[in-house]
Image (spheres, grey):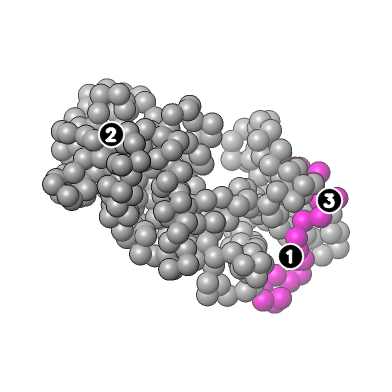
Amino acid sequence: MDWRTLQSDRDLPAFVDAAVELHRPLFERLSSAERPFFNDYWLRRFNEARAYLHANGSEAMALVTVPRSPDLHPFRWGIRTMAYREEIRGAIVLPDDVGLERAFTLPSPTGTVSAAPIIAGTTHEPVQLSYVRSLAGIDPVSPHETAPLEFRTARTGDLEPILHLLERAYADFDDVDPELFPQREEVRQIIEHGAGWCFVAAAPDDSAQLIAMASYVLHPLQLVGVPVILVADLAVDPDQRRRGLARNLQRFAYACMRGAGYRWVYGNIDPGNLASRGQAEAVGREVWFQAVRFRKEGTEE
């Protein structure tokens, strides 16, 4: 399988055109005002990654990018990408220097996750599903849906109650003493330095008693590049689950962020986390792309 590498600015037109064509279903979901972000995203990516293009004459068949630096965050920045035409699915042979040791982000515009082979001689499994939705048309949560709880933006004094809530929520899912340094630091940056948005649901008789929280940061949407609100954390007190709190708090947050001028929201979810996937689908998010990990046939993890 012949691959062309991106070596100079003379190669850029073919690679940029390939990015548009091989991500066409996602590209066409963008408004005309947002499409320049797509172009900028791929120009930046081609500066920061090794890029490989397989073409049949003038028709792009597959495009692969591999960051030049090691991954700094597994599913936000620096991940490898792959896009291809369905007619070569199962027949793709990657360049020798690409390797399979890292996950790849692939567009999934239909929302389906097929188990059919992608790369010749390999199997694959999804490791993240990225659920996306437009903030247009969000129905704001009504007071009778939130009563008697108070839904509001987090305040400085909420930091410690939020951290305690995260500890209770994560301990219930993972272990009795979860290590939450990344989550703690992200929430601290959001609340103390305005590095994002955090919303909470508080008990009616004690505003410091937090029942649920949702935090968000600004991020370029993978493969597309438009500014997007990324779900950083979503937690509900274990004793308060199955009351619709996560759904209503997200609707409240979406309406607030739409009012601030943002259009898109997304979050990465483990395919096996059916509860989180159900929550995402309940507020209208759908799979736009997925991260998959490959392994050679006959090998195990």
C-beta proximity under 8 Å, tags 2 and 3: no
Q: Amino acid at mark 3?
A: Thr
Q: Are marks 3 and 1 in contact (CB under 8 Å)?
A: no
Do the CB atoms of the residues marked 1 and 2 lie less than 8 Å apart? no
Q: Residue at x 71, y 38 (%)?
A: 185
Q: Position of residue 41 (x, y in %)?
A: 45, 49
Tag on residue 151? 1
* Residue that mark 2 sits on: 5
Question: For the magenta stretch, what is the residue range?
Answer: 142-164
**Residue receiving disc 3:** 156
Q: Earlier in the sequence, mark 1 or mark 2?
A: 2
Q: Secondary structure at mark 2?
A: strand
Q: In the shown orientation, is residue 150 left or right of residue 80?
A: right
Q: Nearer the viewer, mark 1 or mark 2?
A: 2
Residue occupying the point 61% across, 48% down: 232
SS class of the residue under badge 3? helix
What's the residue type where badge 1 is placed? Phe
Q: Is residue 257 visible?
A: yes
The three-letter code of the residue at mark 2 reads Thr
| Above or below 228: residue 15 | above
